[in-house]
Amino acid sequence: MRVGLGFDVHRFAAGRKLVLGGVAIDSDLGLEGHSDADVVLHALMDALLGALALGDIGMHFPNSDPAYRGADSKELTRRVVAMVQEAGYEVGNADVMVLAETPKIAPYVADMRASMAQLLGCETGQVSVKATTMERMGFVGRKEGVAAQAVVLLQPRKEDGK
Ligand SMILES: Nc1ccn([C@@H]2O[C@H](COP(=O)(O)O)[C@@H](O)[C@H]2O)c(=O)n1
Ligand SMILES: C[C@@]1(CO)OP(=O)(O)OP(=O)(O)OC[C@H]1O
């Protein structure tokens, strides 16, 4: 078994869409980024890569590379999941924490879990999404941006018999 941890932060920006966990969120502000700035999938990818000591998303998908301008983080996640499978592992479970003063994440949690389970090739019951405000403290509390944390457990793929 391998465990991995991921964390990411993106700043709110006008004129951008807000996408979290691959799900479009109704919001006046989106998040700034070279890619689509899906902070939740970025944290999830870093957790997957971290579990296998494969570096981080910036190493695999550099923000200096025009190829990733406006990149769909769902596609990047599929690539990371392929790396996990090639290494002989599958997701045991994933737990994601969204730190956001706004918007309310609760109405989107079911869709986010389903979206991430599909990307990870597992059941919705293996993916948890939770949210908290920062009680108006710090950059999240001042509504400057959104942060996300993710933890994943990887287990040897069953057909590999590891
Ligand atoms: N962006 C957020 C933040 C919180 N929630 C939900 O509200 C609950 C209470 O949040 P506190 O920060 O006051 O503890 C939290 O447990 C979440 O269920 C949310 O949906 N979206
Ligand atoms: C996925 C990438 C690609 O440019 O997205 P960004 O929007 O730049 O987001 P960040 O989390 O700052 O860095 C990760 C990058 O690799």
Image (cartoon, rainbow, N blue to C red):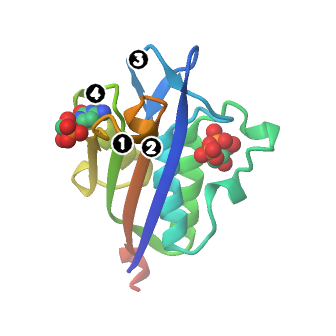
Separation (CA) of disc 3 from disc 1: 15 Å
Residue shown at 73% from the left, 33% from the top: 69
Residue in front for this viewpoint, 156 or 59 = 59
Separation (CA) of disc 4 from disc 2: 14 Å
Labelled pair 1, 2 in contact (Cβ < 8 Å): yes
Classify 10 Å Cα crowding around label 3: few (below 14), some (14-19), many (20 and above): some
Say which mark, if any, is on residue 147. Answer: 2
Classify 10 Å Cα crowding around label 2: few (below 14), some (14-19), many (20 and above): some
Say which mark, if any, is on residue 99. Answer: 1
The vertical placement of 14 against 110, above or below, is: above
> Is 75 left or right of 122, judged from the image as shown?
right
Residue 129, position in %: x, y? Answer: 28, 46
The vertical placement of 157 against 58, above or below, is: below
Say which mark, if any, is on residue 27. Answer: 3
Residue shown at 59% from the left, 32% from the top: 36
Classify 10 Å Cα crowding around label 4: few (below 14), some (14-19), many (20 and above): some
Q: Earlier in the sequence, mark 1 or mark 2?
A: 1
Answer yes or no: disc 1 within 8 Å of ligand 1.
yes
Residue in front for this viewpoint, 111 or 5 = 5
Q: Quadrant of ligand 2?
A: top right
Say which mark, if any, is on residue 104. Answer: 4
Q: Nearer the viewer, mark 3 or mark 1?
A: 1
